[in-house]
Amino acid sequence: MRRYLLLGYVLAGLALGLALHLAGLPLGARVAWSLAALPVAAHVGLGVARALAGGQLGVDVIALAAILVAVLLDEAAAAALIGLMVAGGEALEAWAEGRATSALHELMARAPRGAARLGPTGLEEIPASAIRPGDTLLVRPGETVAADGELLDAEATLDESALTGEPLPARFAQGAGLRSGAVNAGAPFRMRAASDAEASTYAAILRLTRAAAETRPPLARLADRWALGFVGLTALLAGGAWLLTGDPLRALAVLVVATPCPLILAAPIALVAGIGRAARRGVVVKGGGALERLARVRTVLFDKTGTLTPGRPALAAIETIPGLPREEALRLAASLAQSSTHPVSAALAAAARARGLALSLPEGLVEHPGGGLSAMLGGRRYVLGSPMLLQELRIAQGDRLAGLAAVAAAAGSVAWLAAEDGAVAAFVMADGLRPEAPGALRRLRALGIARLVMVSGDRAGAAHSVGAALRLDEVLAECSPARKIEVVRQEQARAPTAMVGDGVNDAPALAAADVGIAMGAQGTAAAAEAGDVVLVVDRLDRVAEAVAIARRSRRIALGAIALGMGLSGLAMLAAALGHLPPLAGALVQEGIDIGAILFALLALRPGPGEAGQAQLPAQSGLAERMAEHAGLKRLLERLREAGEAVTGTPEALPLLVALEADLRAALLPHQREEERALYPEAARQLGGQDPMAALVRMHAGIEALVARIGALLEIARAPGGWAQAAPELRRSLFALEALLALHLNAEEEVLSAVGG
């Protein structure tokens, strides 16, 4: 506010002096202009004195000298204009800083201040600081979630744009984890607080953001050093012009056009603007120094579990002995697993619930530490566990299932279900890729990242399968935390290196890298503390966005410095040669200041390497179609099971008829809806010539195979037709399974570019 008041005072003095001059009172005009300039000189002088006391000398000393010399040379109008430049420059700086930090201020303004707690006496309004873990909170429409916690009601709709940058509200089901800072965009809901407000996600974001905004970046300090040289150059040029021409107005003109230089204004504004842009996209950068280092990165190292993969095992495939349906095997395994908190048990139970299977209550449950479970189900004892457990219990795996285990071990792990007489089913568990991971790594390549390396503590087989799928330059498996630090040091010797990780074992490597990038949404506090950049949204593609934002911000900061220095240098030469008098020089320098600062504010605009600028509208049906993929992936299992069931006799005919009906009821309508609404919107966002053509072609192939299976079933129903149709039915079922699996993966990959 004081900056704007000072500007108003100078403008009033200039207007008064101009009125007196036009009224034929030149002495009064000079007095008015001098009175307008001298308070600005005093203001600048105090700033110079404080800087000198701190051992610094900036370009403000040129402004002070220019005003004083103008007054001494009886150039009161020029002095007033210089005062206007200084006051206007400070006001412009305040406005620009406000624009650059608007995202950070919005974050802080949305900090929750109160909450509604449900207690024994009913609803009570409490300050956010009074929230304690275990409190039941009521979040009403439009209110901000005040603490991290768990959703107690059936569902909730939240606007998480302040946390993630995603513009569309997200739906959460009962039991989902909620993060503070999200805004209720639906009906009221109840939640159980898991932490107090100060320990919540949003409070951590605010602490990191404040620290980032207050840190003075190296590029700004570099601008200060350039400013010292600029002061010397200004003094030399002004003094030289005076000595060579004997005209002190030449020296004054040089001082005027050198004042105030935008060097120390533009660079910090550009970097803070970049930090603000990153914050809008769910990326907290801990200061301008981290932003600058991120812009120079050429090598990125990744942890595997929790970073390139979700970090949670999921059921990838089921193999059973002949006569045992896959869903029955899963039901038995999940009935045992539902009593355990082991990640594999949780994955099996979740897979069974997703299929709507009715689980039984096991009797006489025995937990084998580190190995598995055993219990009675339906009067028969079953064992669910690792291969080591089966060996200890002397249970045979069987040749067919043992062969599967050897193949599956390359990409995942195997959980076994066994009865007393041997293994009856094998469940292949895999920690698949994050859906956005392939696209995120390709974007990093496009940004000029020359080397992408995985540094994982996982076993070699699992790590190399992920590395091959992502086309990484190198995969280093079974790495201890000390080995990860060693790899970071080796890569740093080649090029500036970033490390991306989420776990406690990644924290030392994050701290050792030039830039540590922590997956903070689901990762550990140790990783977030060690990282220079924290991703508060659990998406790997934000790494590429952060790099793009950092490079653009640094490029704009350097451009603003070069613009200010270059234009001021040219104006100084013109003034020294007598082509730019003090009054005109003042106007020219004001234009230079405005141009440099406005150029720095370009960092507020999204650049070409940033995602999320245009997303599909809700009416495209993207969320609904992606939700249907889970059911379609279960159809894949049924296709495989049906193909294996086709033998020389028609016992599988009812199974095939039911499957064909489900394909027509679920798969084909899904494809028609995609082509009606989703694909046209996606094509508009992606651009280019018909970007969805390959997916539409796959749709046609899938429809043809479904029609072929229907026609073959008609033949199979006829007397003696089974023998004729069975071989082609088997081939068609396996062909449809392969094509549908390829299509779903390709579709998710393409649509991830417009869905996040």
Image (cartoon, helix red, strand yellow):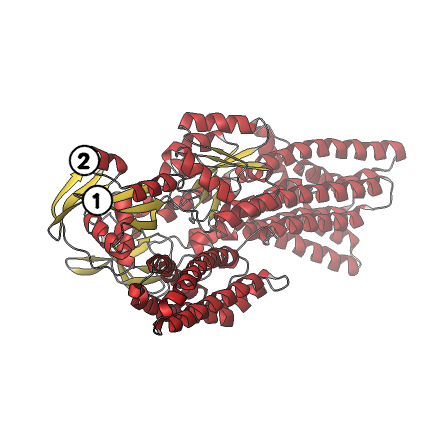
Q: Nearer the viewer, residue 418 or 523?
A: 418
Q: Residue furthest front?
A: 720
Q: Nearer the viewer, residue 228 or 369?
A: 369
Q: Nearer the viewer, residue 216 or 410?
A: 410
Q: Nearer the viewer, residue 316 or 650?
A: 650
Q: Can residue 148 be seen by looking at this rendering? A: no
The three-letter code of the residue at mark 1 reads Ala
Q: Is residue 588 visible?
A: yes
Residue drawn at 43 percent across, 48 percent down:
434
Residue 436, x across and y down, in percent: 48, 51
Which residue is rendered at x = 49% and y = 28% of the image?
487
* Residue 89, percent from left and from top: 65, 48
- Res 390 quadrant in image: top left
Q: CA distance from mark 2 to mark 1?
A: 10 Å
> Callout 2: few (<14), some (14-19), or many (20+) C-alpha neighbours within 10 Å?
few
- In the picture, measured across the screen, residue 243 lies left or right of residue 103, that is right
Q: Residues within 10 Å of mark 1 (few under 14, many from 20)?
A: many
On screen, residue 1 versus residue 585, left or right, reads: left
Q: Is residue 667 above or below residue 166?
A: below
- The total number of labels drawn is 2
Return the residue at label 2: 393
Residue under pointer 1: 418
Please state the horizontal and vertical placement of residue 291, each as a whole percent of the image. Answer: 55, 40
Q: Secondary structure at mark 1?
A: strand
Q: Amino acid at mark 2?
A: Leu
User: What secondary structure is found at the residue carrying circle 2?
Assistant: loop
Q: Residue 253 — which label?
A: none
Residue 478, image quadrant: top left
Is mark 2 in CB contact (under 8 Å) with mark 1? yes
Tell me residue 734's x, y (percent). 42, 58
Q: Which residue is at 61% across, 53% downward?
A: 608
